[in-house]
Amino acid sequence: MIEAELKARVTDPGAPRARLGRLAAGEASTYQDTYYDRPGRELTSQGRELRLRVIETGGVRRALVTYKDPPADAASGSKPEFETGVADAMVADVILRAIGLEHLIAFDKHCVNYRFTARGREMLATVVTVPEIDGVFIELETMADEPGLATALADIRAVLGELGISERDLTTEAYTDAVTRARTRTRHDARQ
């Protein structure tokens, strides 16, 4: 399955949050994401991702390992996704490093998730802040098979429009890239 997803950087998150609140109750979570790659960065250069995510919601922690193939849709960056729960994130990290993978980058995301049905699809809207990145992001996703991806993305665009989010707000910039850039600036400023 493909995670059909669009992400927007919103300048005024109040209105979309209020509209989302009318669709579903929000659930606040903190994600601790660690991305892995081989020493030669083959996964990254091929557009693939391997992530270990620890999610804390209301004092309960759970961990997921996610692998994403290169984008099935270049314009949106939507990728086939394979995900499974793991009992112990520390053990998963040891295994991933033992087979030759390295930490590429790790960072926290503060999220409020809204699950609802729109246009006949189960959707997940996530309001995201990353402490190292300026701004607030809204991600809207649903699962689709490859033949249905274009329709799923059209449905997502329509729902984003209903939330007051326009095409000009959309971004395909990865959080990994934005955090890397922010850390590079911080190191550069510290040297000055």
Image: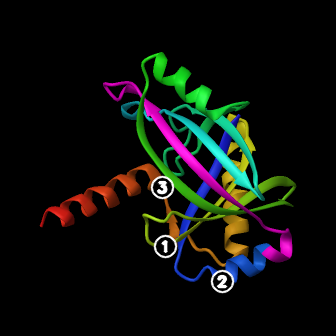
Residue 102 position within the rendered picture, expressed as x and y whole percent measured from the top left: 41, 29
Q: Is residue 43 left or right of residue 71?
A: left
Q: Earlier in the sequence, mark 2 or mark 3?
A: 2
Q: Is residue 90 left or right of residue 183?
A: right
For residue 21, above or below residue 37: below
Q: Residues within 10 Å of mark 3 (few under 14, many from 20)?
A: some
Give me the C-alpha separation between circle 2 and circle 3.
Answer: 22 Å
Residue 58 position within the rendered picture, expressed as x and y whole percent measured from the top left: 78, 59
Please tell me which residue is depicted at 61% across the width and 42% down the height of the picture: 53
Q: Amino acid at mark 2?
A: Gly
- Mark 2 touches mark 3? (CB < 8 Å): no
Question: Can the viewer see residue 174 in this picture?
Answer: no
Please tell me which residue is depicted at 75% across the width and 81% down the height of the picture: 18
Q: Is residue 22 left or right of residue 67?
A: right
For residue 181, above or below residue 61: below
Q: Amino acid at mark 1?
A: Gly
Q: Amino acid at mark 3?
A: Thr
Q: Which residue is mark 3?
A: 172
Residue 106 position within the rendered picture, expressed as x and y whole percent measured from the top left: 46, 46
Q: Which residues are magenta?
A: 21-42
Please tell me which residue is depicted at 58% across the width and 45% down the height of the picture: 78
Mark toward the viewer: 3 or 1: 1
Is 63 or 113 nearer to us in this picture?
63
Q: Quadrant of the rendered structure where residue 88 is? A: top right
Q: Which residue is mark 1?
A: 135
Quarter of the image where the N terminus is located: top right
For residue 84, above or below residue 74: above
Q: Which residue is mark 2?
A: 14
Q: Earlier in the sequence, mark 1 or mark 2?
A: 2
Quarter of the image where the C terminus is located: bottom left
Q: Which residue is outermost to the left?
A: 192
Q: Which residue is outermost to the top?
A: 99
